[in-house]
């Protein structure tokens, strides 16, 4: 929606003006960076991590003697005002929403070391190996088991950390400019993943978490293009053309899934017409997610209202669930006093979402 697009524009523009400032300092660029940071912060919490990205870019320019900005002025003119903005964000969220984060309630749900490491590895596989598109239905259970095994997770994280450290030490000896660029962009990519690590990571054949990777993909593709031209030389253009063609094919599959989900949801809404004469209708289950795409997660009443002009108070939406096809339905419904209990097909991913909210097992 517009908020995601607005957030991407202001935050990436903030990075652009910061790079301009490193090359040619001026007060106008400082003001531009801080205004854009403020707008990005209050449009989405992802902006929390941008001081880290600013520091990486500053270090890249500093190590190559491309900027006159000092560490002291970096903190005085950039990090201290941004710290004040972040503190203001927490206060506003607490006052208006009664919790510290706009989207999430507390710090304990954000800081989960084991799950963060698992999701980080999933994102690496998602970007580097097209993990979501791989035909690994038979290996799905095995992959999920690995993702919850502490020893496997620690082993992978140690290998990645060792690789980054080894590359950094090599750069210190050689002083390669392109190497420093790769390292800086890779670190920016890692940092940009931090806000999305506590979120849903059911990547295998599920499309709805893709939006969490939009911003990190900016740094990933910069890294991919620069590494291709440096390592593949004359083969870089054919490689990137083939890569783009593959992305186009996979994106076409995604667009088809979006369109089919949209058609299915429209048919469901039209099927509501026979119930217009009732004073109160309880909708037990709708496809909150259909075939891996967010469907009626939080807008089923509104969609019916716009289709038929039916007052919202006549509709009571009980829950939504993950549907893989039009044949999915509830297996059991039990009514006892004022409690409605129902059961659907078991899934390894979160299944029910109550009142159109976040998925619940």
Image (cartoon, rainbow, N blue to C red):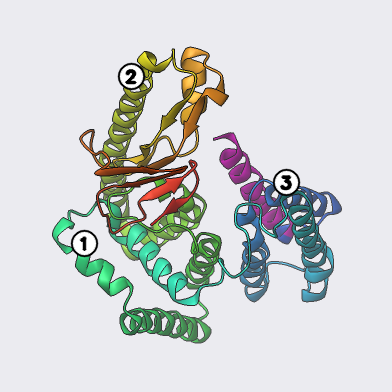
**Would you say the magenta stretch is mainly helix, strand or loop?**
helix
Tell me where residue 207 sits by quadrant. top left
- Decide which of tag 2 and tag 1 comes sooner along the chain: 1
The residue tagged 2 is 271
Instruction: Please name which of the two marks, 1 or 3, marks the residue nearer to the observer.
Output: 1
Q: Is residue 81 visible?
A: yes
Q: Is residue 68 left or right of residue 304?
A: right
Could you say where residue 149 lies in the image, as x and y percent from the top left?
A: 31, 79
Please tell me whether residue 4 belongs to the stretch shown in magenta: yes
Residue at the farthest front position? 337
Q: Is residue 321 visible?
A: no
Q: Is residue 97 left or right of residue 88?
A: left
Please tell me how crowded label 2 is: few (under 14), some (14-19), or many (20+) other residues with Cα within 10 Å.
few
The residue tagged 1 is 140
Q: Quadrant of the C terminus?
A: bottom left
The residue located at (49%, 19%) in the rendering is 279
Could you tell me which secondary element the residue under label 3 belongs to? helix
Q: CA distance from mark 2 to mark 1?
A: 35 Å
Please tell me whether residue 177 belongs to the stretch shown in magenta: no
Instruction: Please name which of the two marks, 2 or 1, marks the residue nearer to the observer.
Output: 2
Please tell me how crowded label 1 is: few (under 14), some (14-19), or many (20+) other residues with Cα within 10 Å.
few
The residue tagged 3 is 39
* Residue 128: image tag: none
Q: Quadrant of the N terminus?
A: top right
- Decide which of tag 1 and tag 3 comes sooner along the chain: 3
Front residue of 87 and 289: 289
Residues rendered magenta in the picture: 1-21
Q: CA distance from mark 2 to mark 3?
A: 42 Å
Front residue of 115 and 175: 115
């Amino acid at each position: 929606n517009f908020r995601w697009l607005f957030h991407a524009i202001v935050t990436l523009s903030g990075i652009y003006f910061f790079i301009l400032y490193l090359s040619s300092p001026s007060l106008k660029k400082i003001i531009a960076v801080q205004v854009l940071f403020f707008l990005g912060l209050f449009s989405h919490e992802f902006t929390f991590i941008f001081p880290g990205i600013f520091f990486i870019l500053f270090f890249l320019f500093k190590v190559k003697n491309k900027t006159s900005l000092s560490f002291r002025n970096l903190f005085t003119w950039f990090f201290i005002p941004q710290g004040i903005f972040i503190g203001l964000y927490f206060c506003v969220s607490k006052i208006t929403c009664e919790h510290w984060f706009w989207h999430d309630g507390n710090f304990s749900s954000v800081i989960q070391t084991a799950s963060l490491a698992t999701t980080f590895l999933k994102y690496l596989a998602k970007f580097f190996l097209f993990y979501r598109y791989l035909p690994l239905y038979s290996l799905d259970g095995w992959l999920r088991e690995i993702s919850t095994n502490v020893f496997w997770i620690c082993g992978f994280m140690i290998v990645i950390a060792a690789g980054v450290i080894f590359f950094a030490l090599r750069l210190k000896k050689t002083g390669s400019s392109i190497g420093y660029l790769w390292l800086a962009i890779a670190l920016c990519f890692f940092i940009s993943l931090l806000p999305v690590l506590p979120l849903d990571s059911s990547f295998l054949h599920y499309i709805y978490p893709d939006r969490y990777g939009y911003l990190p993909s900016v740094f990933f593709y910069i890294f991919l293009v620069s590494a291709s031209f440096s390592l593949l030389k004359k083969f870089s253009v054919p490689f990137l053309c083939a890569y783009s063609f593959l992305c186009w094919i996979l994106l076409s599959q995604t667009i088809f899934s979006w369109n089919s989900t949209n058609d299915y949801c429209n048919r469901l809404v039209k099927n509501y017409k026979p119930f217009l004469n009732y004073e109160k209708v309880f909708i037990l289950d709708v496809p909150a997610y259909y075939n891996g795409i967010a469907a009626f997660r939080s807008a089923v009443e509104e969609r019916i209202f716009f289709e038929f002009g039916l007052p919202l108070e006549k509709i009571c939406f009980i829950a939504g669930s993950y549907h893989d096809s039009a044949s999915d339905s509830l297996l059991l419904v039990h009514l006892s006093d004022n409690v409605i209990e129902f059961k659907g097909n078991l899934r390894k991913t979160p299944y029910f979402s109550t009142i159109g909210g976040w998925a619940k097992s």
